[in-house]
Image: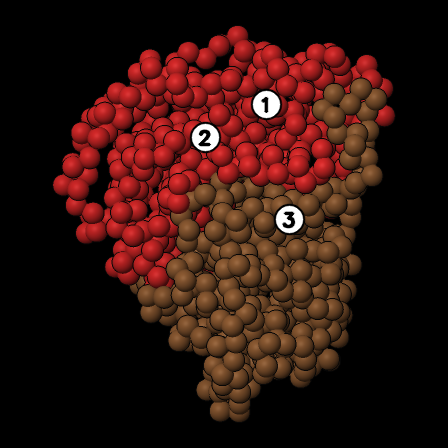
Chain colours: A red, B brown
Amino acid sequence: MKIDLNFSKDIIKEEELDSYEGDIFSIHNCLHSKDEYERMPLGWIDLPERYDGKEIENIKKTAYRLRSNSQAFISIGIGGSYLGSRAAVEMMQSDSPEIYFSGNNFSGTYIQQIVNKVKDKDFSICVISKSGTTLETAIAFRVFRDMLEKRYGKAEAKDRIIAITDKNKGALREIANKEGYETFEIPSNIGGRYSVLTPAALLTMAVAGINIEEVMKGARDAYSSYNDPKLQSNNCYRYSVLRNILYKKGKHIETLINYEPSMEYFGKWWQQLFGESEGKEGKGIFPAVLQFSTDLHSMGQYLQEGSKNVFETIIKVKNPPEDMNIPCFDDDIERLNYLKDMTFNDISNIAYKGAMKAHEEGGTPVISLEIPAIEEQCFGHMVYFMEKACAVSGYLLGVNPFDQPGVELYKKNMHKLLDR
Amino acid sequence: MKIDLNFSKDIIKEEELDSYEGDIFSIHNCLHSKDEYERMPLGWIDLPERYDGKEIENIKKTAYRLRSNSQAFISIGIGGSYLGSRAAVEMMQSDSPEIYFSGNNFSGTYIQQIVNKVKDKDFSICVISKSGTTLETAIAFRVFRDMLEKRYGKAEAKDRIIAITDKNKGALREIANKEGYETFEIPSNIGGRYSVLTPAALLTMAVAGINIEEVMKGARDAYSSYNDPKLQSNNCYRYSVLRNILYKKGKHIETLINYEPSMEYFGKWWQQLFGESEGKEGKGIFPAVLQFSTDLHSMGQYLQEGSKNVFETIIKVKNPPEDMNIPCFDDDIERLNYLKDMTFNDISNIAYKGAMKAHEEGGTPVISLEIPAIEEQCFGHMVYFMEKACAVSGYLLGVNPFDQPGVELYKKNMHKLLDR
């Protein structure tokens, strides 16, 4: 597959991109150098080429077992251990079991609702945390572990709990070893928000019936496509450069726009990826997520005529999974029978082109990324595209796209405030 | 009830607010004048005092009938005819029927999924559109009208279709008259995004089992509370003024933050209200919606250390509907047994205070709005609070907070592009 990239040529000239050729060449060589690989958590960059096929097999086997003994499955994690798998599940899940996401907030109401939903069902869980001490995740894990042990007894409960954590250290690793849980590993050289193509997200995806081998195939395809140091022919780098150009032109907000409602959580995963990678040292583009055409009837006003501090990045799916015709009525009072040869998706395409043109004319630049379909390979491809584009964006901005000192501060504060 | 308002006193001084006293006094008098009422769509401003109790009774009766003959209910609308009712349903629905929202996008996949969900259930629908020609809504209405007529025959289908539209004119009014649908009226002097307390949202809420009399009671309470021309004692006006002060200080992005996941769509309703009211003439604060503590693990980084162009408005619920204790384990490997006397909501309160303090120290100003609970009266109160705060914000910014020329342009373009 490929991602078609287009942008507002009236607002950005091709020559502006060309001036980044040298920078991109250097960043490419740096990112792919042995030194940088040892210095930075760059394990994600060549993962699609070197991942362990046997581990994928093991994930599939475990998922098969859980799918056969569970009507519901709870994926317990937050941040990078949450958004990637939820994005995939919302885009591609087609059958049972019911998938719930917990451990991503402190709301007593939210967790009680999940408890109510699974209390009369056979269920199993996975808990995803490198350290095992991230508080939202750790306390939700306690709730469902307790529920499983009371329901099934310790011996059976342990077969319904999967721990995804660091290979050797941390509280969750210790618990898993002691209790005899099956475990999968979050590689130590891959940060949370870059971990979608690791067990951190793959197990939940497989339990939801998503073909994870196809996901990895898509990522491998993207790895080759974007392993090209030449800016002109590398759409991933072109996206990074366009963002940087627009940021310098005062466009400090990027809205990621989907036309398919099932992609909302892909947007939220993207928001974490870029917000957490770039938002530091007083810099960074503010990433926001919108759904079209829904939000053309709300934020459309701002994008058309509001402050000129925004640009749009649209993900457009060429062939969405389903479609529908527009019924005719004899009386045709609203005069819509003329649409009888069009489908919903046909009209969506027209809205897409129309809104893009109107917003550009209103002074809001648009980058469009067209993908062929909402399928496993496309998902893997898009994930890798965004991860690499994000890393390059960070280097262009002059920040470290792999740390998150502000989030660590929050985690530390929480433990301090709780009086430990 | 009351809304407690607090803000970062290190960043904004009380004297800065005081300097707005005269402006606020004038805007208050203007908004409440007979002239302005005739000139502008201000029907929402005194609605809580003058609404028709008999209409509320009729909505309740219809809702009762639909609840008894429907396992599922589809609310078909977009923008102001969608977000308000969805906000209420997600916050407060406790029982059946299943509520679906359609007519808010062009995705063939999305509508097919709803068709699949209701196809083996008894269902009914309402369609909400002033004109009846808003395309997303009009074509979704065709799909479900067709489905109902084929399933139940025209005669029974008509009792399962409610039209909420203009009193006299428009395509939907014409269809309803011809087919004999029951109808409710969207008042002509209330714009879409200000229409939550009208049948546009109230019918769907009542079908979802929400007590709409209590909602109106909360709004009436808010009407009196914020009908006070003195800035110092009017928290609604203080919120508008704080926003304006921060906008002038270069904080061009406002994030509305909820700690309760069920309030996400309240955030999206707020986003439309403010984005569409202020985003014009090259001006306006960009409204974005975040969930905490979820997003403390993603956008938390940006808010702590990123570009200094953001402020936070937090809605904190003092007594959320449910809560849960944290189970103890004998081995206590993660060392969390010390939390045994705390609940999820206790920890949420600590996260709230901790994050607020840390973000303020990082240079991100915070406005906090504390509400007592997630209940009907609070919802009605909050809606009115935000509507009035939004109108006053528009006047302070010098834009008309009641029009949406950019959205009208999109709607017109769509019909043109479809070659009418």
Q: Position of residue B116 (x, y in %)?
A: 60, 43
Q: Position of residue B315 (x, y in %)?
A: 62, 57
| Residue A250 falls left or right of residue B206 | left
Q: Is residue A207 above or below residue B35?
A: above
Which residue type carries mark 3? Tyr
Give how far apart the Cα atoms at labels 2 and 1 are: 15 Å
Comes first in the chain, label 2 or label 1: 1
Q: Is residue A357 above or below residue B130?
A: above
Residue B155 in sight: no
Q: Residues within 10 Å of mark 3 (few under 14, many from 20)?
A: some
**Residue closest to the far bottom:** B34
Give how far apart the Cα atoms at labels 2 and 3 are: 23 Å
* Residue plotted at (63% across, 81% down): B227
Which labelled disc corresponds to residue A130? Answer: 1
Residue B5 in sight: yes
**Image quadrant containing the C terminus of chain A:** top right
Which of the chains bears the disc numbered 3?
B
